[in-house]
Image (cartoon, grey):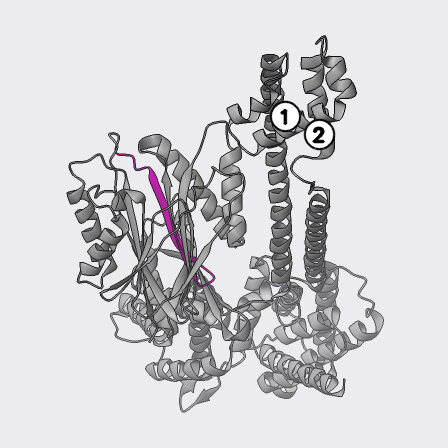
Amino acid sequence: MESVTKKRDLEVGLNDIMLVFIGFFISRVSILNELTPFGIAFLGTYLLMKRANAALLISVIFGMFTIHGFSGSPYYIIAIISYYIFTNILREKEYTLLKSSFILSQIFLSIRILTFILFEKVLLYNMFVIGFESVLVFTLSYIFSFSLPIEKMYMDKANKEKLACTFITMALVLSGFNNMEILGVSLKNILSIMTIIYFSYYSGILMGVTSGVIIGMIAFISNTEMPFIISILAAGGLLAGLFRDLGKSGSILGFILGNGIISFYINSLGTSFLDYRELFIASIMFLIASKFIKIDLEDYFIKTSHIKKYYENKKDEIAIKRLNEMESLFKGLAEVLNRSIDEEVEYPSVEVYSLIDDISKKTCEGCPSSGKCWGTDYYNTYYNILNLVNKLGNGEDKEKVFHSIEECENKDSLIENIMEIYSEFKENKSFNIKHLEHRKLLAEQMENLSKIINDMGNDFYSTPIFNEELEELILKELKNKRMDIASLSVIELQKGEKEVLVEMASNIESFETIEAVRKEVTKNLGFPLSTDYTLGNLNGDKRSFKLVRKKRFNSLTTISKSSNSEDEICGDSYTFGERENIHFSAISDGMGIGKKAHKESSIAIELLEKLMDINMDKNLIIKTLNSVLRAKSTDEIFTTLDLSFIDLYTGKLQIIKNGCPATFIKRGKEVKVINSSSLPIGILEDIHLNIYEEELQDGDIVIMMSDGLIESNRREKDQEKWMKDCIGAIDSLNPKTIINEILNIAQFVGKDNPQDDMTIIATKIWKNV
């Protein structure tokens, strides 16, 4: 607490020093070489808006004294009386700004008239001058009340009036340096030039022109060459802001060019209104000041109030609370569903008893032997029918099953009823099992959704830092390279990591566009970056993507494909991308060729991309795809899905296969084969995933393909071995060359046979240097 208190005392002291400095120089501003009402207006405004400040009163009087000497006693008396009135009589601040400004002007007017009556001759001209000064006091006090450093009411949007009033106050402070020279060089000119270049460099063209016009008009109002000086300062501010992309030297050069252009236009460079020594000194002072002083106008003019900040934080807390409640809700629903799922045996006793009763009622009622079978021989009859149903359920041959009821008088009717009732029973049971499957999947999805919501809640607690200085430097370089960038954000995360969010000015047309931006940003940041994207998100109207710091491995993916349907629509679909430094690739092969096959495979790929975007668990991704394809319609929709994940931190490869051909890993001339005998997704009610893992090495190439390539050579019995040999024989380390060669071989050997669609993806990884 002691250290905090000392820090606050120091801040208050610095503010008071700055206020005294401003009051002193504003009070030195004069009109017609004799009128100095500006300091009194500033003092009165501060007393109206803030509190008593004796130091400010002394600085104002001392400033006017440097202009008038002892002859300025009327101004000193006005300052003292105004101070007394506003600190004792009107200290409650119960008047509006307009009324308070009017009161201050009337106090000034009354005392000025009184001092003239007592000490000087009363002339009409003097009364006119006094009236003019009182109007100035009224106007200036209202202007000062909306300018820094007096008014500090932050707003959510830039207030143009407040900005203009602040620049007027700043221009008056610069005017207070009038007649101050060192070796014939004007301090006012130097400070004016330095201020304009500073705001042009840090705040752009608008602030450069605004500061140039206002400083020229206010600070040089008593100068006969004021119109020309305004032109020079405005043009200098314009060009200084325009050339700021070239750096600080660019802004300095821009101001010098502005001065030269206007001077040439006015007098053909015969005389410059600004001394070249002043330009040189101001430039040096700007370079020094820019290293130690950072003034961001948005910090003063666009800032959320403490009340709004409180409610914004409260809004975040409410959002986090709602997310936590949703997480608990979905987690609870998943637990309830898991508890409610019927985990009994496949055929519960009650259902079997009901099945046998239905068979007996439909077959044995009215039969002459019914009394014997269901009377004295009840248990034997019941056991026989139960045994028949059990054998049918185990898939035994029907003739062998029904051989045991040759002695039944109503044999044909019994067999027909058993088959009919058992088929209905089996169909109902299949529906119940499918329903159970969907309930299990729903429970798993809800549990995974609760984890995703939990991650979202954790993200609220992280406070990323936006490095605006880096953003500005990188944007300059990208624009210099004529890249179509709309915005760029550099986010500093925990442990020193950085992410770069890029938004293009127009839709992303190709992966090459992203690569060009990635390479340029990498060069500027000084460490390698990778692109966090999904291929499907680069199509359509997408404009943004993310760059993240690369880890141990880089990856490069290339694709080749060939359609063999008449409409030239490929039944294979594919995707690849990177998420959280995990590279993934996928090929989906719809059954057959053409539109229908493309529809099947594209559904799987589009859904896969959406699930990858939310970082869903791999096992749950496959189960969700299987469930959606099975439940989508009454049509049979079968499609293969070949998935690979490469961890770019560790180099570990994970492969998930469903009904797809082998994956090949090319390591120089050595080729490794990874295959699977699993069925396509969308066929079975439940699928069992086998995840194959392999440690990749520097330079390895992972090759995935649809079955159209492997099955192209019908003459080979061992088609996988044939493809392995083909890949091993290709003498190239370029993944694009390799897949093009494989595709050419497959098309050549299969030219005499009907061919399936062909798609091949190769991903090469290599270590970062």
Query: Answer yes or no: do the residues labelled 2 and 1 have beta carbons within 8 Å?
Result: yes
Image height of 341 relative to 287, above or below: above
Image height of 557 relative to 548, above or below: above
In the image, 175 versus 11, the foreground residue is 11
| Badge 2: residue crowd in 10 Å (few <14, some 14–19, many ≥20) | few
Question: Considering the image in quadrants, where does the C terminus appear?
Answer: bottom left
In the image, 76 versus 716, the foreground residue is 716
The percent position of residue 371, horizontal first and vertical second, equals 76, 14
| Badge 1: residue crowd in 10 Å (few <14, some 14–19, many ≥20) | some
Name the side, left or right, on which 86 lies relative to 596.
right
Q: Quick check: can you spot residue 504?
A: no
Residue for point 63% across, 66% down: 124
Residue for point 34% across, 76% down: 249
Question: Considering the image in quadrants, where does the N terminus appear?
Answer: bottom right
The residue under label 2 is: 351
Residue for point 30% across, 71% down: 257
Name the side, left or right, on which 10 lies relative to 392.
right
The residue under label 1 is: 425
Among the 4 quarters of the image, the one containing residue 573: top left
Name the side, left or right, on which 688 lies relative to 748.
right
* Helix, strand or loop for the magenta stretch, by majority: strand
Residues at marks 2 and 1, CA–CA distance in whole angstroms: 9 Å
The percent position of residue 48, horizontal first and vertical second, equals 74, 69
Q: Quick check: can you spot residue 650?
A: yes
Helix, strand or loop under label 1: helix
Q: Amino acid at mark 1?
A: Phe
Q: Does the magenta portion include 70?
A: no
Q: Amino acid at mark 2?
A: Glu
Q: Which residues are magenta?
A: 568-585
In the image, 380 versus 672, the foreground residue is 380
